[in-house]
Amino acid sequence: MLHTNGIHEVAIKYCGSSRALPQHIQLLRCQLYPSTQLIVKMCATFELLGLLHKFALTTKASTYNFYCRLEKLMNNTGIGLPKNRYRSLFRMSMQWRHLKLLKWAGRGHDPAGVDATEPGQLAIKCPSCPHRGINLLNDFESAPEAYRFVSFLNLRMDAI
C-alpha cells in the first residue's frame, strides 16, 4: 500500500459473505484506490493520490520523483527497498486525474453517462479569452464597428 508516509505491506481481509461487493469496490469504499480491478496486489490511499496531483500541479515534480521520495521515507540507505511500484503508481495517478476531471465536469450525473463525453468536453475554458455571455457581451457584434473594441477593453480590465 502506498501512503503519504511511505510504502507499506498490509494484509487486507475482504468481506466474504454471499452478498459481498467485489474486492475493488470494497477498497474504494475504504478510500483505497486499487491498481487493478481483477487481482488487487497494490493500492494507494486517496490522500496520497490527491497529494501527488497537487504536487504535480504546483511544483511540477514528476511522479517518479514523488515515488523516489516515498522510497526514501522508508529506507534512505537504498538497501532492502520494497519491490518497485512506480509503474502502478503512475497508472493510478493518471486514472485518478481523469476521474477528477470527469467529476469536476459533472459527467457522473449526466443521464447519458461518462461514455457520452465528447472529445475536448473536459477542457477548461481560458479565463483571459473572450467567451460570449461570460466575459463578452452577447450583442457585441451589433455595436458599431468603431466601438467593438470596448468589449475587449472591458475584458482586459477584468483580467488585471
Image (spheres, grey):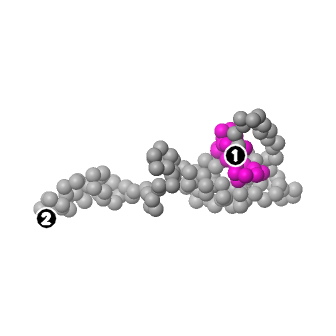
Please indicate, yes or no, whether residue 100 appears anywhere in the rendered image: yes
Question: What number is the disc on residue 14?
Answer: none
- Please name the residue shown 71% across and 35% down the image: 19
Residue 42 is at least partly visible in this image: no
Q: Is residue 113 left or right of residue 14?
A: left
Q: Amino acid at mark 1?
A: His
Residue 60 placement: quadrant: bottom right
Residue drawn at x 54%, y 50% is 100
Q: Residues within 10 Å of mark 2 (few under 14, many from 20)?
A: few
Q: Which residue is mark 2?
A: 146
Q: Position of residue 58 (x, y in %)?
A: 55, 54
Q: Is residue 2 above or below residue 126?
A: above
The disc placed on residue 24 is: 1
Viewport quadrant of the C terminus: bottom left
Q: Is residue 152 left or right of residue 84?
A: left
What residue lies at 81% left-to-right and 43% top-to-bottom?
10
**Depth order, front residue of 147/123:** 123
Residue 8 pos. (x, y %): 79, 47
Total labels: the figure holds: 2
Residue 151 figure quarter: bottom left
Query: Given the image, on which type of amino acid does mark 2 rest?
Result: Ala
In the image, residue 156 lies in the stretch drawn in magenta:
no
Q: Nearer the viewer, residue 138 or 149?
A: 138
Query: Dot 1 lies on which element?
Result: helix
Discs 2/1, front = 1
Question: Which residues, given as a range, are shown in magenta?
Answer: 23-48
